[in-house]
Amino acid sequence: MPSTPTPLTQGLPSAWSAIGVAVALAIYPLLMSVAGQDFYIGLGSRVLILALAASALNLVLGYGGMISLGHAAFLGIGGYTVALLAQGGSAPAWLAMPLAVIAAAAGAALIGAVSLRTRGVYFIMITLAFAQIFYYLAVSLRGLGGDDGLPMLARVELPGLSLGDDIGFYYFVLALAGLAFMLLYRLAASRFGRALVAIRENEQRMAAIGYPVYRLKLAAFTLSGGLAGLAGALLANLSLGVTPHLLTWHQSGILIVMVILGGSGYFWGGLTGAAIYMLLEESISTHTEHWNLWLGALLLFIVLVAPEGIMSLRRKPAKAERA
Amino acid sequence: MNPALLQAQGLVKRFGGLLATDHCNLEVARGEIHALIGPNGAGKTTLLAQLSGELAPDSGRILFDGKDITRLPIHKRVAAGVARSFQITKLFERLSVRENLALAVQARSGHSFDLLGAVADEAALDQGAAEIAARVGLGDVFEQVVATLSHGRQRQLELGMALACGPRLLLLDEPMAGTDPEESRQMGKLILSLRGHCTFILVEHDMDAVFRLADRVSVLVAGSVIASGTVDEIRSDPQVIAAYLGDDHDAGAAA
Ligand SMILES: Nc1ncnc2c1ncn2[C@@H]1O[C@H](COP(=O)(O)OP(=O)(O)OP(=O)(O)O)[C@@H](O)[C@H]1O
Ligand SMILES: [Mg+2]
């Protein structure tokens, strides 16, 4: 095994870190409940969902080097799918959630098929343009509720678990996000994951040694879109409805900020970035109206201290710990 | 059976108004080291890029082993047995020699859409990488990150990457560019050691190396092959001397 970490190995999480994260996330709502801080359980759900969305983006942005400024489109497709299915009252989870993922993945496959023929700034602009098309569709189509979006009367239904209350819903989110993280975990360590990172490192060489670069990128983009769609579907459930705001480029931008903040190309980068972003936003916005300004300043400070993201700070200390 | 492994017929490639490849014909026999020489800007790299599939010719066709590969994407040509090295080193600079070569070996073994199987313990890939590293003389820096290697070492890896694709036809774009005489000699030895195992198209400016290594030589001037033949034929071809070798020889005499 390699003595020093290289870009091929830095994105591989240790099994222990995965177990630690899983345990912490599983007991979190119980601790909050005991402490009488029920508000933080709902916040926890939101953080987990955004962590999932950011991690989905991290797969293409961090691992694959594809800077998508259009991931809000997949949040939106997932969210609107669930909200549409729930218009009759409520929808069964086993139907609504997979459909949301499939719809978002299909959208990502289409957008990716066109966008991935371009590179660099053009790719950023094309993904942005596609997301804007979805935004305007949502705003202008009567069936999608226009500016008001689509409210939901109730969350999706799952026999045996009450998703209406905060703890029940948190575990629903944790179960689905957990599955997604397991998938991403295996991906990162697979031949596919390694090829993806290598494409980020040197696309021309990857083509020259015989990889179907375009198809590999499209596969990653489609998977990423599907997982972002799952996050969108969960968000719709959390907030009991969707609005076109979910589709704004501002949302895509926030996801990018989360990934860069947490560590682009690091397995826990999405989770770390989402958690820190949300906690900062939450704590600052309760103190001042100008929280955006302070949040910006703080993010700038963090990025200056850790230009490769917070997870990159862990690299060396982690080695010392083991020794 | 057709003795030619590769045939390019009437290839044309335009960059805007510039005719970089001008109705170019080239025939490379099975097992030979075929040198491709020509002055700067003659279109050698552009021709190789069309053979490897990175550039699509505007017209003409390319036959590999009798089959038309003109429209085949790069990865399928690599699978069919055509691999190239680059004039300007293009390696995974932040990765180790082992990781570079293992990636190339992995491409050959397929399964890159295997989404879930872990690679960390794939000894076979590392084994394949180690064999290539030993072959191109990089065994001692196997675990070293490429960016820390000398230019000469990187040129060796550049060749190793193409070799790791298991090619039947190797397109080498100035493998000796920027190397010192000793490294150059080593590279020549390496190429000779592979003679018979695969066929070469060798683009090279170092005429001594070309005349020492090549079985046959084609001369490319302004995008078309003006002469093709054995080393002796090319050396004495008046057209070649006028168009190309003449200058070189004068420069050599003056030095
Ligand atoms: N992508 C491109 N776009 C426009 N012009 C190009 C491009 N690539 C090459 N050219 C031009 O095509 C001509 C042939 O270039 P090429 O690099 O193939 O020559 P070469 O024989 O490899 O030269 P050298 O010996 O310097 O490597 C040159 O005039 C070059 O400027
Ligand atoms: Mg050249």
Image (cartoon, coloured by chain):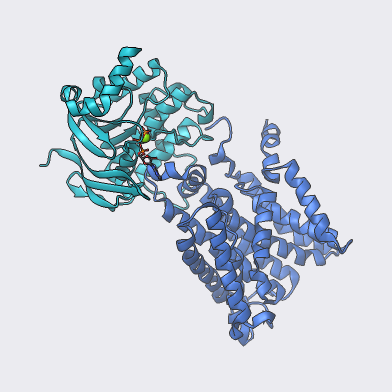
Chain in blue (letter): A
Res B101 visible: yes
The picture quadrant for ligand 1 comes to top left
Quadrant of the image occupied by residue B122: top left
The reply, left or right, for residue A32 in relation to residue A163 is right
* Residue found at x 54% / y 53%: A66
The picture places residue A18, in percent across and down from the top left corner, at 63, 49
The picture places residue B192, in percent across and down from the top left corner, at 27, 23
Q: Can you say whether A36 is above or below A263 in the image?
A: below
* Residue found at x 72% / y 76%: A164
Q: Closest to the observer: B168 or A172? A: B168
The reply, left or right, for residue A185 in relation to residue B116 is right
Q: Closest to the observer: A20 or B13? A: B13
* Residue found at x 47% / y 57%: A116
Chain in cyan (letter): B
* Residue found at x 51% / y 27%: B144
The reply, left or right, for residue A310 in relation to residue B150 is right
Q: Can you say whether A225 is above or below A146 in the image?
A: above
Q: Closest to the observer: B180 or A248? A: B180
Res A78 visible: no
